[in-house]
Each structure stands twice: as C-alpha cells, then as structure tokens.
Image: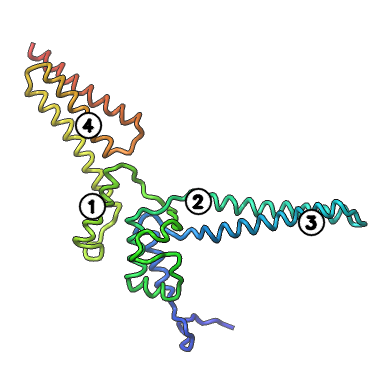
Amino acid sequence: MGLAPLSSQGSHPFPDFSAARREAAFFMVNTPPEAIFPSRMEAVLEIVLRKSDEHLHAERELRRLERQPTDRHEMDVRQKQMEVESRLAVYLDWLHRAKRIMEMPQPLSLDHRELQNNIFKSVEGQQYMRWQSQDGWGSPDDRTGHRQDLVTIQGRSRESIWANLAVGPFLRWFNRLLGRRDVPYDENAVLLVSERVAVVLGGICLTGSITVLYNLDSMWFRLWCINVFTVIFAAVLCIISSEPASKTFVGLCGFAAVQVVFISGIEDTSS
C-alpha cells in the first residue's frame, strides 16, 4: 500500500513544512559559516547517566551470580560478563560523545543573532517554528539566552583582532545601515576584503618608514625613527595578524632589517 505525503492529505491537521525545514537547515549551515546547532547537552548527559546506571546494575548482577553458584553457574556468569562488557562499551561511547560536544565552541554573538532573526522573523522560519519547540533556540529579543546550549560545528577561520572587528562591529553597522536582504553579502567576502586591507596597511608602514628615513639627514634621527616605526609596525602586526608570537617577531625583525639596510645604502651613497 502506497503512502502519500502529508501535504497531499487534505484532512491532515499538520501541513508539510519540509521546505521550511530545508530553508532553516540551509541557513544554519551556510549563512553563518559556523553551522550552529543545539547541543542538547542536558539530554546527552541524562543518557550518559542512564548508561552508567545500566552498567553498574549489570555489574551488581554479575557479583551476585558469582556468589551463588548453580548448575549453570559458568554459563550464566559468562553471559553476564559479556553483558557488562557490552554495557561498559556503550557507556564509554556516550561519554566520549558528551566530551566531544562539550569541547565544541559556542557560536559568536553575531551569528547567534543572525540565526535567531532568520528563525523567528523570516517567513520560512516562522512556518518551521510553528510546529517546533522554541526551547532550543531562544528568541530574537533574548540575545544571550540558550546560546550556552548551542555549539559550532564548523568554526570561522579567523582569530586576529582586525578580522573580528570586520565581522563584528563593522557588520553590525552595515546591517543597521542597509541590511542583508537589501544588499546580499557573504561574511567570507568581508573577511577577504579585510585581509587585503591588512596587507595594504602593512605596506603603508614599510613604504612610509622608508620615505621618512630618506628625507632625514641625521643618523640619530634615522635611528630614532627606526625605533618608532618598528613599534608602530609591531602594533599593526598584533592587530592584523593571527600568527603565533614567534612568527610575528620574525616579521618584525625583517621589517627592522629592511630599514637598517636602507639607511646603510644611503650612507654609502652619500659618502
């Protein structure tokens, strides 16, 4: 006997919201490139505790069988040992699952807010949430609630202060000014532009320092300017770079070396 979709059964009280579900899932995975989902941590921990109780109960049964030998003593003990091992494996598996979930980072506030706006304010999101519980998603009026139970499956590849400013305060200002729906954009494109701007800022520091050093006649002023520009470049690197401190220091040494070689060339030419 064939089964018709719910949407084709006119008398069925529930509509077909699979399209809204697909729209919500697409947004959760693609629009905020963090793939945000509820962790259901409380439910997972309840399962872990239940599996632990089942394993302990099986162990107690095994100890009871070992103290009460019967005609089938060895067979019963062996079967109970296999049950204890099986329940222990299940318990450890759920324990590792809980550990992996707890190690997942929480979503950024920007992506959390975007996800809430899509679920509660868009037409597709409202159709989907009509038949779903709101306990796992909070509300657009609550900017922090339920965020602690959300996890990030696919994190953003950004760590620098400059990139965080680009996708944080800048995007909030841009959304207030124009909005995503009026001017569609991708956060990855914003990150790409911010990286290019960071490269330009580093180039400005280098070319600016060379220009100033070229127009100075006193060696003491040149050395003083090298110190100043090195400190400025160090501050710029700390803002625009997400590299470890060791690599940042190497880049800083290279910057200072270029300036020293430049003024040495000027001295040789003038002499």
Give SS at disc 2: helix
The residues tagged by marks 4 and 3 sit, at their Cα atoms, a distance apart of 70 Å
Disc 2 packing (10 Å; few <14; some 14–19; many ≥20): some
At 31% from the left edge and 28% from the top edge, which residue is drawn? Answer: 249
Q: Which residue is mark 1?
A: 170
Quadrant position of residue 240:
top left
Q: Crowdedness of circle 1 by 10 Å Cα count: few (<14), some, many (20+)?
A: some
Which residue carries the number 4 mark? Answer: 233
Question: Where residue 143 appears, x then y in whole percent?
Answer: 34, 60
Sequence-wise, which precedes: disc 1 or disc 3?
Answer: 3
Q: Earlier in the sequence, mark 2 or mark 4?
A: 2
State which tag comes first along the sequence, 1 or 4.
1
Residue lying furthest bottom: 11
What secondary structure is found at the residue carrying circle 4? Answer: helix
Tell me, yes or no, whether the two marked residues, 1 and 4, touch with CB atoms within 8 Å. Answer: no
Q: Are marks 2 and 1 in contact (CB under 8 Å)?
A: no
Give 1 or 200, whichever is nearer the viewer: 200
Query: Is the Cβ of the residue at disc 4 closer than 8 Å to that at disc 3?
Result: no
Give percent across and percent down for residue 56: 71, 54
Distance between the alpha carbons at the discs numbered 1 and 3: 62 Å
